[in-house]
Image (spheres, grey):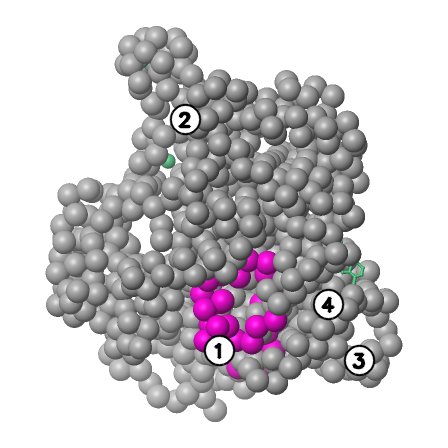
C-alpha cells in the first residue's frame, strides 16, 4: 500500500509536492487522479497525483491528502509525460502546465453536485457501446467531397511522404481545397478506428470549419476552445476519457492537452500562424510543435497545411525532416487574385488620398458594390485612432502604467483577458492582465497593454489647446469613413473589440457569408483562412506597420499576412482583385507578394538569417526581467548578463529594452541567447535555471520576475 503521493499543484513553483496518504484513501489512489490537499496557510487546493511511493520525504513536515476526487485517472500517463516535456523544454513549472492544460472546473474543489456529475461520468467510462463496433466500417459518414485530379494526386503524395517520415507539409495555394483533403484524411483515420486532432490557430475559423466537418462527420466531432464555457470544455475532456470519445477534435492550441486514447492523425491548419505560440502566461509553448511531438509519441501522422509555410517548416521540409507536397492550383482552376500596388507616398504628394483610401481602392469598392459583390478590408490596428495628439504643442496622452500611447476608441468596447484569441500583432506582442472594466460607449482613451481607460480630455493639459486630433487609422475609423464614403453599403467590423463572445463572431461571419453585409473591415482576423464566395475585392490599407516591426521575422510575417488576405479574394469562378497600399512600393518583398513568389521571399530571407545567425540556423531563448523599479531592473539585467556571459560567452546579446519597455507598471528588460542548433539543451537549461535562482535569492532582486521564452515568435 503506498504511503505517499507526489502531487502536481497549479503553482509556478518548480517540482512536485509530497503528501502523506491516509490509509483509508490509499486503495483508491492512482496516478492521474485529482486530490484535495492543504497548501499554504489554511488554503486547500486541487492537485494531481503524479506518482505513489513509500519513501518518506526528509526534512519537511508532511501534510496529508484530504480527499481523492476521481475514481479513475483524468490525466493519462502519456499526457503527464507530455506535460513534463513541456515544462522541461519551455523552462516553466509542471504546475504552470497543469494550470494551462486543464479546464478551471477540474481544478476547483468540487461542489457536491459536480462530484456526483463526475461520478456519473466515471460510470460512463465502464460502458462499452455498440457504436464502437460500428467504427471502422467507414460506411457512416455523410458523403465525402469528390476530389479534383490535382487534389487526388496531392492526397496520394501525402501518403507516399508519410511512408518516409511521419510529418508532411502541405504547401497548397489559397483556395486549393486543402480542407477537402483534410476531410478525406480524417475519414481514412477514423475508418481505421483512430482519433484525429485538427488544430486551428484562431477561434474565428472554427465556425466555418465545423459547419463543413459536421456535414460529413456529424456528432463524431467535438469542438474545444476558450469561447466555450468552462463547463463545456470540462465535459469534452471527460468524454474523451470514456469509451465513447469524440473521434475528431477541432480546437485551438489548448486542445493539445486533451486526453486522446488512440490518436492517429494530427492536422495543423495554417501552420505558419503565430497564434500557435502562447505568449502569456507560461507555459510559452508552441502548440504546433507540441502537436508534432505528441503525434510522434503516439506513432500518429501529422499534416501541416498552409498556403504560406513558416520558413522554419519549409526549411525542415527542404532538409528532408518533413515530407513536402504541393498543391499549386486553386480548386476550379480559378486564378490567383491580381494584386495592384498603390504607392501611398505618391498619392499623398498628389493629395489624392481620402483618409486611408486611395482613389484606386475607392473606385474598386464602388464597382464591386454596384455588381453586388463583397469586399474585405484589412487594417492591422484596432480602435479609432492609434493615438491622439495636441495639434499645437505635440502632446500625446500615454498610459501611466505602460510605455505606449493610448488608443482612441469611439464605439463600445471592453477589455478582457485574451486567451486563445490573443493576436500578438494586434496587441503588439503582449497580452495583459485580467481586468473587467465596464463597457464604454463614448470616446475613451485606452491602453491595449493593460486595459487602462480614461475619458478623452477636453483640452490639452500642457497648453490648454482644445484641439486634440486623432492620428493613424484604426478599424473603427475605417468603418466610420466607409459609411461616409458609401452610405448605402452595409459595413461590419471584425476585431478583438467586436468578437468578445462566440455568438458575436459567429454572427459576423454568418452575416457576411449570407451577404447580409457588403464590406467586412478587420484586423488580422480577416486574413485567416476564411472562405467566402462573393468577395471580389480585398484592400490592404497599410502594409507599412507590418513591414517595420523590429523583428527578424517581420518580412516573413508580412509576406504571409498579405498573401493570406489576398487569398480571400475571388475564390469561386472569377479572379479577384487586391489593392496593396504602401509607402514602400519598391521593396522587393512587395513584388514577391504580387508575383505570389514564395520561393523568392523564402530564399532572400534565408540568406539574411544565415548571415545574421537567426533561426532556423540558431535557436533563441529570451530571458525576460521585470521589476517595478527601473533602477533595480537595470541592475538586475546587468548582473544577469554578466553571469550568463560567464556561461555562454558571446552567445549572450543584450540586455536591451523591448519595444514596449514598461507594461502594467513593470519595467521590462530582456537578454537574448543565440545558441547553435547543435548545442545540447539539457546543460543550457540547467545553467539558465541556476542563474535565475541565484539572482532571485539576492534580497535586492527578490521581488523581480524572471522568465524564459524558448523559441520566441
Ligand atoms: P483552402 O483551405 O486551400 O484555402 P478550401 O478548402 O477552403 O481551400 O477550398 C476552397 C473552396 O473550394 C471551398 O469553398 C471548397 O468548398 C471548394 N472546394 C475545394 N475542393 C473541392 C472539391 N473537391 N469539391 C467541391 N468543392 C471544393
Ligand atoms: Zn498642447
Ligand atoms: Zn497600460
Of labels 4 and 3, earlier in sequence is: 3
- How many numbered marks are there? 4
Q: Which residue is mark 2?
A: 387
- Disc 2 crowd rating (10 Å Cα; few below 14, some 14-19, many 20+) is many
What residue is drawn where x is 43% and y is 50%? 555
Determine the quadrant in which ligand 1 lies. Answer: bottom right
- In the image, residue 653 lies at what x, y percent? 21, 58
* Residue 686 sits above or below residue 588 on the image: below
Whichever of callouts 2 and 1 sits on the residue coming sooner in the sequence is 1
Q: Nearer the viewer, mark 4 or mark 1?
A: 4
Q: Nearer the viewer, mark 2 or mark 4?
A: 4
Q: Which residues are magenta?
A: 297-325
Query: Of the residues under marks 2 and 4, which one precedes in the sequence?
Result: 4
What element does badge 3 sit on?
A: loop
Label number found at residue 321:
1
In the picture, the disc for residue 189 is none
At a point 29% along the width and 41% down the height, the residue shown is 662
Mark 4 or 3, which is nearer the eye? 4
Could you tell which of marks 3 and 2 lies nearer the N-terminus?
Answer: 3
Label 3 CA crowd tier, 10 Å (few <14, some 14–19, many 20+): some
Amino acid at each position: 500500500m503506498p504511503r505517499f503521493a507526489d502531487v502536481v499543484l497549479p503553482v509556478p513553483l518548480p517540482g512536485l509536492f509530497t503528501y502523506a496518504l491516509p490509509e483509508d484513501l490509499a486503495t483508491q489512489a492512482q496516478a492521474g487522479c485529482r486530490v484535495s490537499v492543504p497548501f499554504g496557510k489554511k488554503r486547500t487546493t486541487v492537485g494531481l497525483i503524479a506518482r505513489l511511493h513509500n519513501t518518506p520525504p526528509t526534512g519537511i513536515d508532511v501534510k496529508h491528502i484530504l480527499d481523492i476526487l476521481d475514481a479513475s485517472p483524468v490525466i493519462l500517463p502519456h499526457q503527464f509525460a507530455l506535460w513534463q516535456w513541456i515544462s522541461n523544454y519551455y523552462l516553466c513549472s509542471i504546475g504552470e502546465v497543469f494550470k494551462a492544460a486543464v479546464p478551471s472546473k477540474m481544478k476547483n474543489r468540487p461542489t457536491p453536485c459536480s462530484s456526483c456529475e463526475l461520478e456519473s461520468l466515471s460510470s460512463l467510462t465502464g460502458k462499452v457501446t455498440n457504436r464502437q463496433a460500428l467504427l471502422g466500417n467507414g460506411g457512416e459518414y455523410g458523403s465525402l467531397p469528390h476530389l479534383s485530379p490535382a487534389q487526388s494526386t496531392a492526397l496520394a503524395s501525402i501518403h507516399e511522404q508519410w511512408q518516409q517520415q511521419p510529418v508532411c507539409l502541405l504547401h497548397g495555394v489559397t483556395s486549393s481545397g486543402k480542407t477537402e483533403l483534410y476531410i478525406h484524411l480524417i475519414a481514412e483515420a477514423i475508418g481505421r478506428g483512430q482519433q484525429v486532432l485538427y488544430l486551428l490557430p484562431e477561434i474565428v475559423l472554427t465556425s466555418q470549419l465545423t459547419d463543413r466537418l459536421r456535414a460529413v462527420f456529424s456528432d463524431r466531432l467535438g469542438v474545444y476552445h476558450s469561447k466555450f464555457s468552462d463547463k463545456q470544455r470540462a465535459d469534452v475532456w471527460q468524454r474523451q476519457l470514456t469509451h465513447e470519445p469524440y473521434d475528431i477534435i477541432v480546437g485551438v492550441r489548448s486542445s493539445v492537452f486533451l486526453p486522446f486514447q488512440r490518436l492517429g492523425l494530427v492536422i495543423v491548419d495554417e501552420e505558419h500562424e503565430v497564434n500557435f505560440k502562447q505568449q502569456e502566461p507560461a507555459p510559452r509553448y508552441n502548440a504546433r510543435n507540441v502537436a508534432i511531438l505528441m503525434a510522434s509519441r503516439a506513432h500518429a501522422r501529422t499534416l501541416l497545411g498552409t498556403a504560406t509555410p513558416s520558413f522554419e517548416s519549409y526549411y525542415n521540409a527542404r532538409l528532408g525532416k518533413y515530407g513536402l507536397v504541393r498543391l499549386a492550383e486553386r480548386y476550379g482552376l480559378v486564378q490567383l487574385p491580381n494584386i495592384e500596388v498603390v504607392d501611398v507616398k505618391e498619392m499623398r504628394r498628389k493629395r489624392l488620398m481620402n483618409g486611408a483610401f486611395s482613389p484606386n481602392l475607392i473606385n474598386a469598392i464602388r464597382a464591386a458594390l454596384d455588381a453586388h459583390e463583397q469586399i474585405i478590408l484589412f487594417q492591422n490596428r484596432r480602435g479609432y485612432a492609434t493615438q491622439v495628439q495636441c495639434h499645437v504643442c505635440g502632446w500625446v496622452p500615454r498610459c501611466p502604467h505602460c510605455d505606449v500611447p493610448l488608443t482612441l476608441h469611439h464605439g463600445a468596447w471592453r477589455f478582457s483577458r485574451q486567451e486563445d484569441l490573443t493576436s500578438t500583432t494586434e496587441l503588439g506582442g503582449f497580452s495583459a492582465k485580467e481586468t473587467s472594466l465596464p463597457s464604454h460607449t463614448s470616446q475613451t482613451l485606452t491602453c491595449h497593454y493593460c486595459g487602462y481607460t480614461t475619458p478623452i480630455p477636453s483640452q490639452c493639459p500642457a497648453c490648454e489647446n482644445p484641439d486634440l486630433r486623432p492620428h493613424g487609422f484604426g478599424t473603427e475609423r475605417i468603418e466610420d469613413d466607409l459609411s461616409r464614403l458609401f452610405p448605402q453599403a452595409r459595413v461590419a467590423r471584425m476585431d478583438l473589440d467586436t468578437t468578445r463572445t462566440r455568438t458575436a463572431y459567429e454572427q459576423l461571419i454568418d452575416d457576411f457569408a449570407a451577404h447580409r453585409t457588403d464590406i467586412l473591415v478587420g484586423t488580422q482576423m480577416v486574413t485567416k483562412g476564411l472562405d467566402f464566395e462573393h468577395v471580389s475585392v480585398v484592400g490592404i490599407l497599410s502594409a507599412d506597420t507590418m513591414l517595420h516591426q523590429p523583428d527578424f521575422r517581420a518580412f516573413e510575417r508580412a509576406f504571409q499576412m498579405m498573401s493570406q488576405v489576398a487569398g480571400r479574394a475571388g475564390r469561386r469562378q472569377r479572379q479577384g482583385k487586391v489593392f496593396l497600399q504602401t509607402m514602400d512600393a519598391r521593396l522587393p518583398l512587395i513584388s514577391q507578394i504580387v508575383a505570389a513568389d514564395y520561393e523568392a521571399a523564402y530564399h532572400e530571407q534565408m540568406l539574411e538569417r544565415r548571415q545574421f545567425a537567426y533561426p532556423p540556423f540558431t535557436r533563441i531563448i529570451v530571458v525576460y526581467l521585470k521589476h517595478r523599479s527601473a533602477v533595480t531592473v537595470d541592475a538586475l539585467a546587468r548582473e544577469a548578463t554578466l553571469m550568463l556571459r560567464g556561461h555562454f560567452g558571446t552567445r549572450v546579446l543584450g540586455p536591451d529594452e523591448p519595444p514596449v519597455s514598461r507594461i502594467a507598471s513593470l519595467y521590462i528588460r530582456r537578454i537574448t541567447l543565440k545558441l547553435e542548433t547543435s548545442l545540447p539543451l539539457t546543460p543550457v537549461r540547467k545553467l539558465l535555471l541556476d542563474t535565475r535562482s541565484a539572482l532571485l535569492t539576492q534580497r535586492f532582486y527578490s521581488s523581480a520576475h524572471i522568465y524564459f521564452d524558448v523559441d520566441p515568435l
